[in-house]
Amino acid sequence: MKRSYSLNKVVLSCLVVISCVFSSPIGTIASEVDENAVDGESLYGLLLGEKAADNEAPAEGYDVLNGLWKVGAIDYDYNNNPSINMIVDINDSDVISDLYDGIYLSFFSDGTFVYANPFIHEGTYIPHPKNPGCYVLKTDRTYRLAVENDEVVEVEQEGSKPSYYLEVCDDSLHFQDYDAFTGQPKANDNGYYFVRLETESSFIQNNKADVQFKDPNEETDNNSGAEIDSSVSLSSYAGILEAYTAKMERAVPQLVNEYNNESFGISDINELAELCNKKVGDLAEICTEGVGKMADLMYSNGDSYDTYDSWAQKLMDNYNDIAQAIMDAYLDSTM
């Protein structure tokens, strides 16, 4: 049964929905609600209201997990080396904080959870059978939100249904992908540390790495925005991925504005396509630069090509997602 939520009950913001007109099963709807989404607090409130009707005894672990959580820190493998893992407080850098803003995790008394990143995963949580203080989260369905007939509706997403490994670390939750074969977190998986909304975690503060970041207002040579200090970010594939994803995210609003201004009054679809390709190409230059940094790192470390290629593909995937904003502007101008 499809759930729907009246717009007057939901605060619209820019946190959860992905609008991808080419891959969406209801692409026309997705394009109409570009930049509209349901924020995590509103979604949690709506779901809590539904589940509060159940008067059953709360599920095991609910007394510890209950509430709404957001990312407070991330795992970071220095030099891509899992043996040198650090906890990085996302609030120590605006660049990193922006990357993880809008990722939410919530738990309910009926033994279910909701994980939004940015698709919404719903499933069940149970205590780990062998590890006290740990839980296994199994996804039952994945969907995104769209607006149809002035209502926010759920659009089912086909694909895998991942499971997650959750460890309670004092006042934070260490969240990682789950390996069903070993019953443990997946090897070398970099996860998140969730904290309750509007709170600060003493566990993160006591265990986080002392990392120095550049001033976020400092411009780089190509004026594409600030980067994490090169000694931290550009010395690992994960850091390069984060830095250049952030650069593309900062660049795309300006490129969209440029396209809208330069396409004004143009009706020839071929001319509009050329202009769109030019703006997408400008964004691609940032991605290409990041891929080049990864290649340099591969040669410097003596890594295998497969290692480089897997990280480069992640950056290119992010580029494709971010470039969609320019494609949406192009489609709007042709209608």
Image (cartoon, grey):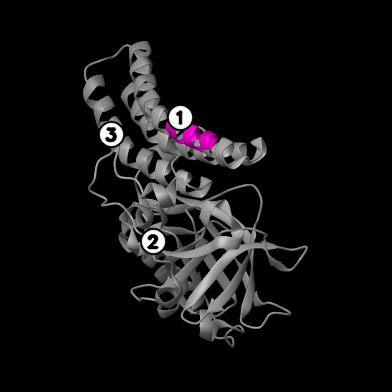
**Residue 289 on the magenta segment:** yes
Element type at mark 3:
loop
**Residue 34 on the magenta segment:** no
Kind of residue at disc 2: Val
For the magenta stretch, what is the residue range?
Answer: 288-296
For the view shown, which residue lies furthest in the right direction? 181
Q: Which of pointers 1 and 2 indicates the residue nearer the eye?
A: 2
Q: Which residue is mark 3?
A: 221
Q: Main structural element of the magenta stretch: helix, strand or loop?
A: helix
Image quadrant holding the C terminus, namely: top left
| Left or right of residue 267, residue 168 in this image | right
The image shows residue 153, relative to residue 224, as above or below, that is: below
Q: Which residue is mark 2?
A: 211
Mark 1 or mark 2: which comes first in sequence? Answer: 2
Q: CA distance from mark 1 to mark 2?
A: 27 Å
Q: Residues within 10 Å of mark 1 (few under 14, many from 20)?
A: some
